[in-house]
Image (cartoon, rainbow, N blue to C red):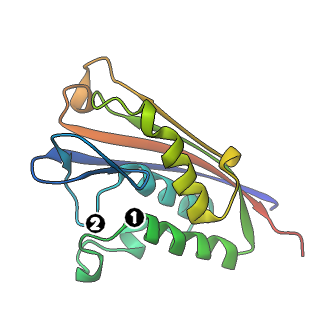
Amino acid sequence: MNIRIGHGYDVHRLCENRKLILGGVDIPYEKGLLGHSDADVLVHAVMDSLLGALALGDIGKHFPDTDPQYSGADSIVLLKHVYELVKKNGYVLGNIDATILAQRPKLLLFIDQMRQNVADAVGCDISQISIKATTEEKLGFTGEGLGISAHCVALLQKVND
């Protein structure tokens, strides 16, 4: 098979006394995301899409929240590890398309840096990384400001030997 497609999804609750990190960017906001690592829902969705494309499980399998070494982990560093698995399996990234669902804060000013951080982590051109943000029109847990979620689809291409 020359191409593989994977989908990733992640969600974390917003809480006090945590940094809000999305796409490896520290976003100024009064709340952050609760999680064992830095709780970067965008990067977690990206990693799950890459792992899913190759049927390698999910980030919980590779970086369990029961393992203290991942407490407070930088998700961009974990993404680099996941991409090493992609290359080890003979694939390269075609493209990533991700969407962050958050009522607040507004993320437009941070999107390009998120794209660059993800591109740098997987060693590709920024043009291969699409990141969008949308609100939920105040509906559901994200719309009520209780949490933030992200979806991601990744296309992997087999490296020609």
Left or right of residue 161, residue 132 in this image? left
At horizontal 50% and vertical 54% (from top left) the residue drawn is 46
Q: Amino acid at mark 2?
A: Ser
- The quarter in which the N terminus is drawn is bottom right
At horizontal 22% and vertical 53% (from top left) the residue drawn is 19
Mark-to-mark CA distance, 2 and 1: 7 Å
Give how far across and how far down residue 70 sits, in percent: 29, 76
Q: Which label number is shown at residue 37? A: 2
Give how far across and how far down residue 52 sits, in percent: 55, 59
Left or right of residue 123, residue 48 in this image? left
Q: Is residue 142 above or below residue 70?
A: above
Residue wearing tag 1: 75
Left or right of residue 123, residue 27 in this image? left
Left or right of residue 146, residue 105 in this image? right
Q: Is residue 30 above or below residue 18?
A: above
In the current view of this chain or complex, which residue is farthest to the top? 137
- The quarter in which the C terminus is drawn is bottom right
Q: Earlier in the sequence, mark 2 or mark 1?
A: 2
Circles 2 and 1 in contact, beta carbons < 8 Å: yes
Q: Which label number is shown at residue 135? A: none
Asked which secondary structure carries label 2, the reply is loop
Label 2 neighbourhood size at 10 Å, few (<14), some (14-19), many (20+)? some
| Count of labels in the image | 2
Would residue 58 be visible to someone looking at this image?
A: no
Residue 145 sits in quarter: top left
Asked which secondary structure carries label 1, the reply is helix
At horizontal 42% and vertical 75% (from top left) the residue drawn is 62
Q: Amino acid at mark 1?
A: Ser
